Image (spheres, grey):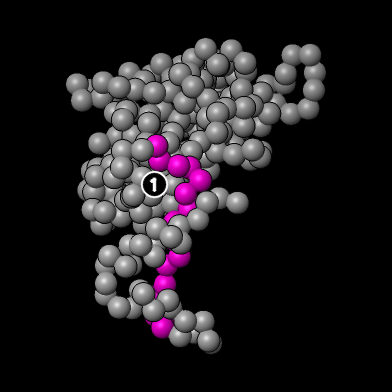
Protein backbone atom coordinates (compact mmCIF):
# COMPACT_ATOMS: atom_id res chain seq x y z
CA UNK A 1 0.00 0.00 0.00
CA UNK A 2 1.12 3.54 -0.74
CA UNK A 3 0.03 6.61 1.19
CA UNK A 4 -0.23 9.84 -0.78
CA UNK A 5 -0.18 13.12 1.16
CA UNK A 6 -1.14 16.12 -0.96
CA UNK A 7 -0.42 19.64 0.29
CA UNK A 8 -2.53 22.32 -1.40
CA UNK A 9 -4.36 25.60 -0.81
CA UNK A 10 -7.45 24.23 -2.60
CA UNK A 11 -8.26 20.92 -0.88
CA UNK A 12 -11.82 20.70 -2.21
CA UNK A 13 -10.54 20.38 -5.78
CA UNK A 14 -9.88 16.70 -5.07
CA UNK A 15 -13.33 15.79 -3.72
CA UNK A 16 -15.02 14.55 -6.90
CA UNK A 17 -11.91 12.88 -8.30
CA UNK A 18 -11.31 10.79 -5.18
CA UNK A 19 -14.90 9.58 -5.19
CA UNK A 20 -14.97 8.12 -8.67
CA UNK A 21 -13.67 5.13 -10.65
CA UNK A 22 -10.36 3.36 -9.99
CA UNK A 23 -9.18 5.67 -7.21
CA UNK A 24 -12.42 5.28 -5.26
CA UNK A 25 -12.22 1.47 -5.49
CA UNK A 26 -8.55 1.45 -4.50
CA UNK A 27 -9.30 3.60 -1.46
CA UNK A 28 -12.23 1.40 -0.47
CA UNK A 29 -10.08 -1.72 -0.74
CA UNK A 30 -7.37 0.03 1.30
CA UNK A 31 -4.83 -0.55 -1.45
CA UNK A 32 -3.88 3.12 -1.22
CA UNK A 33 -4.44 6.03 1.15
CA UNK A 34 -4.81 9.65 0.06
CA UNK A 35 -4.77 12.46 2.59
CA UNK A 36 -5.31 16.09 1.61
CA UNK A 37 -3.65 18.80 3.71
CA UNK A 38 -4.63 22.48 3.53
CA UNK A 39 -1.48 24.61 3.45
CA UNK A 40 -3.40 27.45 5.10
CA UNK A 41 -3.65 25.34 8.28
CA UNK A 42 0.10 25.78 8.74
CA UNK A 43 0.21 29.58 8.65
CA UNK A 44 1.05 31.67 11.71
CA UNK A 45 -1.33 34.58 11.12
CA UNK A 46 -5.09 35.01 11.46
CA UNK A 47 -5.53 35.79 7.77
CA UNK A 48 -4.07 32.39 6.77
CA UNK A 49 -1.69 34.09 4.34
CA UNK A 50 0.38 31.71 2.21
CA UNK A 51 1.86 34.10 -0.37
CA UNK A 52 3.57 37.47 -0.74
CA UNK A 53 5.11 39.76 -3.38
CA UNK A 54 8.50 38.73 -4.78
CA UNK A 55 11.65 40.57 -3.72
CA UNK A 56 12.99 42.62 -6.59
CA UNK A 57 9.54 43.25 -8.00
CA UNK A 58 7.68 41.49 -10.77
CA UNK A 59 4.18 40.21 -11.46
CA UNK A 60 2.22 37.78 -9.32
CA UNK A 61 2.70 36.34 -5.86
CA UNK A 62 5.12 33.76 -4.48
CA UNK A 63 4.27 30.98 -2.01
CA UNK A 64 5.90 31.62 1.36
CA UNK A 65 8.53 29.19 2.61
CA UNK A 66 7.33 29.39 6.25
CA UNK A 67 3.97 27.58 5.93
CA UNK A 68 5.46 25.08 3.49
CA UNK A 69 8.36 24.21 5.81
CA UNK A 70 5.96 23.71 8.71
CA UNK A 71 3.53 21.65 6.64
CA UNK A 72 6.26 19.36 5.33
CA UNK A 73 7.69 18.90 8.82
CA UNK A 74 4.33 18.02 10.36
CA UNK A 75 2.97 15.93 7.49
CA UNK A 76 6.18 13.93 7.02
CA UNK A 77 6.08 12.91 10.68
CA UNK A 78 2.31 12.57 11.03
CA UNK A 79 0.83 9.07 10.88
CA UNK A 80 4.16 7.53 10.03
CA UNK A 81 4.35 3.90 11.18
CA UNK A 82 6.68 0.95 10.85
CA UNK A 83 5.31 0.09 7.41
CA UNK A 84 5.99 3.53 5.90
CA UNK A 85 9.76 3.35 5.74
CA UNK A 86 10.42 4.71 2.25
CA UNK A 87 9.15 8.26 1.80
CA UNK A 88 9.52 10.78 -1.05
CA UNK A 89 8.71 14.50 -0.98
CA UNK A 90 7.94 15.84 -4.46
CA UNK A 91 7.44 19.42 -5.62
CA UNK A 92 5.08 19.73 -8.58
CA UNK A 93 6.46 22.40 -10.91
CA UNK A 94 6.98 23.01 -14.66
CA UNK A 95 10.70 23.19 -13.84
CA UNK A 96 10.79 19.55 -12.74
CA UNK A 97 11.81 16.45 -14.67
CA UNK A 98 9.13 15.06 -16.95
CA UNK A 99 6.81 12.43 -15.51
CA UNK A 100 6.67 9.18 -17.51
CA UNK A 101 5.48 5.61 -17.10
CA UNK A 102 8.97 4.67 -15.91
CA UNK A 103 8.72 7.36 -13.24
CA UNK A 104 5.36 5.95 -12.13
CA UNK A 105 6.91 2.50 -11.80
CA UNK A 106 9.82 3.93 -9.80
CA UNK A 107 7.60 5.85 -7.40
CA UNK A 108 5.38 2.81 -6.84
CA UNK A 109 8.26 1.32 -4.83
CA UNK A 110 7.82 3.92 -2.09
CA UNK A 111 5.56 3.51 0.94
CA UNK A 112 4.64 7.16 1.10
CA UNK A 113 4.66 10.03 -1.38
CA UNK A 114 4.16 13.65 -0.34
CA UNK A 115 3.06 15.89 -3.21
CA UNK A 116 3.51 19.64 -2.83
CA UNK A 117 1.18 21.64 -5.09
CA UNK A 118 2.26 25.07 -6.28
CA UNK A 119 0.11 28.11 -7.14
CA UNK A 120 0.49 31.69 -8.37
CA UNK A 121 4.03 32.42 -9.66
CA UNK A 122 5.52 29.44 -7.86
CA UNK A 123 7.55 28.72 -4.74
CA UNK A 124 10.15 30.67 -2.81
CA UNK A 125 13.37 29.19 -4.23
CA UNK A 126 14.46 28.05 -0.77
CA UNK A 127 11.71 25.41 -0.82
CA UNK A 128 13.95 23.42 -3.20
CA UNK A 129 16.04 22.30 -0.23
CA UNK A 130 12.99 20.88 1.54
CA UNK A 131 12.01 18.40 -1.17
CA UNK A 132 13.58 15.25 -2.59
CA UNK A 133 12.79 15.99 -6.23
CA UNK A 134 10.78 18.16 -8.62
CA UNK A 135 8.40 16.70 -11.22
CA UNK A 136 6.48 18.15 -14.18
CA UNK A 137 3.73 16.34 -16.09
CA UNK A 138 4.53 18.19 -19.31
CA UNK A 139 6.04 21.17 -21.05
CA UNK A 140 3.20 23.59 -20.38
CA UNK A 141 1.97 25.78 -17.53
CA UNK A 142 -1.09 25.11 -15.34
CA UNK A 143 -2.63 27.29 -12.64
CA UNK A 144 -1.45 24.94 -9.92
CA UNK A 145 -0.14 21.53 -8.94
CA UNK A 146 -3.48 19.93 -8.14
CA UNK A 147 -4.05 18.35 -11.56
CA UNK A 148 -0.47 17.02 -11.70
CA UNK A 149 -0.95 15.57 -8.21
CA UNK A 150 -4.00 13.64 -9.38
CA UNK A 151 -2.20 12.46 -12.51
CA UNK A 152 0.76 11.16 -10.52
CA UNK A 153 -1.40 9.57 -7.82
CA UNK A 154 -3.40 7.56 -10.36
CA UNK A 155 -0.45 6.59 -12.54
CA UNK A 156 1.49 5.36 -9.50
CA UNK A 157 -1.52 3.67 -7.89
CA UNK A 158 -2.17 1.69 -11.08
CA UNK A 159 1.16 -0.07 -10.58
CA UNK A 160 -0.03 -1.71 -7.36
CA UNK A 161 -1.54 -5.22 -7.42
CA UNK A 162 -5.33 -5.14 -7.27
CA UNK A 163 -5.83 -1.48 -8.20
CA UNK A 164 -6.58 -2.24 -11.85
CA UNK A 165 -9.24 -4.95 -11.99
CA UNK A 166 -7.83 -7.64 -14.29
CA UNK A 167 -4.60 -9.26 -13.11
CA UNK A 168 -3.04 -8.89 -16.58
CA UNK A 169 -4.51 -5.47 -17.37
CA UNK A 170 -1.16 -3.68 -17.15
CA UNK A 171 0.76 -6.18 -19.28
CA UNK A 172 -0.29 -4.80 -22.65
CA UNK A 173 -0.85 -1.14 -21.89
CA UNK A 174 0.73 1.63 -23.86
CA UNK A 175 4.40 2.05 -22.88
CA UNK A 176 4.59 -1.52 -21.50
CA UNK A 177 4.62 -4.07 -24.36
CA UNK A 178 4.31 -7.65 -22.99
CA UNK A 179 6.76 -9.13 -25.49
CA UNK A 180 9.44 -6.70 -24.35
CA UNK A 181 8.79 -7.52 -20.70
CA UNK A 182 8.89 -11.24 -21.37
CA UNK A 183 12.24 -11.01 -23.14
CA UNK A 184 13.77 -9.13 -20.24
CA UNK A 185 14.64 -6.21 -22.50
CA UNK A 186 14.17 -2.49 -21.94
CA UNK A 187 10.55 -1.38 -22.06
CA UNK A 188 10.14 1.28 -24.71
CA UNK A 189 8.38 4.53 -23.96
CA UNK A 190 7.65 4.75 -27.68
CA UNK A 191 5.35 1.71 -27.59
CA UNK A 192 1.71 2.53 -28.31
CA UNK A 193 -0.85 -0.20 -27.67
CA UNK A 194 -2.35 -2.09 -30.62
CA UNK A 195 -5.85 -1.07 -31.92
CA UNK A 196 -8.83 -2.39 -29.96
CA UNK A 197 -12.35 -3.17 -31.24
CA UNK A 198 -15.75 -4.09 -29.81
CA UNK A 199 -19.34 -4.42 -31.12
CA UNK A 200 -20.66 -3.87 -33.72
CA UNK A 201 -18.54 -6.03 -36.01
CA UNK A 202 -19.33 -3.76 -38.96
CA UNK A 203 -19.90 -0.03 -38.46
CA UNK A 204 -20.77 1.78 -41.68
CA UNK A 205 -18.35 -0.33 -43.69
CA UNK A 206 -15.55 -0.21 -41.12
CA UNK A 207 -15.03 -3.83 -40.15
CA UNK A 208 -13.23 -5.52 -37.28
CA UNK A 209 -10.14 -7.40 -38.58
CA UNK A 210 -11.04 -11.04 -39.22
CA UNK A 211 -8.13 -12.38 -37.17
CA UNK A 212 -9.72 -10.97 -33.99
CA UNK A 213 -12.93 -12.87 -34.66
CA UNK A 214 -11.46 -16.33 -35.20
CA UNK A 215 -10.43 -17.30 -31.68
CA UNK A 216 -6.87 -18.28 -32.66
CA UNK A 217 -4.97 -16.70 -29.78
CA UNK A 218 -1.53 -17.28 -31.29
CA UNK A 219 -2.54 -15.45 -34.46
CA UNK A 220 -4.22 -12.70 -32.45
CA UNK A 221 -1.03 -12.16 -30.46
CA UNK A 222 1.02 -11.94 -33.67
CA UNK A 223 -1.45 -9.42 -35.12
CA UNK A 224 -1.31 -7.31 -31.97
CA UNK A 225 2.48 -7.30 -31.91
CA UNK A 226 2.58 -6.34 -35.58
CA UNK A 227 0.10 -3.51 -35.11
CA UNK A 228 1.58 -2.01 -31.96
CA UNK A 229 2.87 1.37 -33.07
CA UNK A 230 5.81 3.56 -32.29
CA UNK A 231 5.06 7.09 -31.16
CA UNK A 232 5.17 9.52 -34.08
**213 vs 8: above or below:** below
Residue 138 magenta-highlighted = no
Q: Quadrant of residue 127?
A: top right
Relative image position of residue 72 (x, y in whole percent):
43, 20
The residue shown at (47%, 49%) is 191
* Residue farthest toward the left in the current orientation of the protein: 82
Classify mark 1: residues with Cα within 10 Å, few (<14), some (14-19) or many (20+): many
Disc 1, SS: loop
Q: Nearer the viewer, residue 136 or 59?
A: 136
Look at the image and tell me in which quarter the N terminus lies: top left
Q: Is residue 182 visible?
A: yes
Residue 197 magenta-highlighted = yes
Q: Nearer the viewer, residue 188 or 95?
A: 188
The stretch in magenta equals: 186-201
**41 vs 166: above or below:** above
**202 vs 190: above or below:** below
Q: Is residue 175 left or right of residue 134?
A: left
Relative image position of residue 22 (x, y in whole percent):
34, 53
Q: Is residue 54 left or right of residue 15?
A: right
Q: Is residue 44 visible?
A: no
**54 vs 150: above or below:** above
The residue shown at (42%, 36%) is 102
Q: Main secondary structure of the magenta part?
A: loop
Q: Nearer the viewer, residue 202 or 91?
A: 202
Return the residue at label 1. Answer: 176
**Number of marks drawn:** 1
Relative image position of residue 230 (x, y in whole percent):
52, 51
The residue shown at (46%, 61%) is 227
The residue shown at (34%, 34%) is 108
Q: Is residue 107 left or right of residue 51?
A: left
Relative image position of residue 183 (x, y in whole percent):
31, 42
Amino acid sequence: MIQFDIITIFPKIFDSYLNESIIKRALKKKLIQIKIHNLRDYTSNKHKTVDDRPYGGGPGMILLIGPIAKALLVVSRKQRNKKTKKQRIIMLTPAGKKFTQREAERLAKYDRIILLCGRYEGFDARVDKLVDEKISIGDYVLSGGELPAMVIAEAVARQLPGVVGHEHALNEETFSPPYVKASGGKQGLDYIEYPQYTRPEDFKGQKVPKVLLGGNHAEIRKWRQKNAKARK
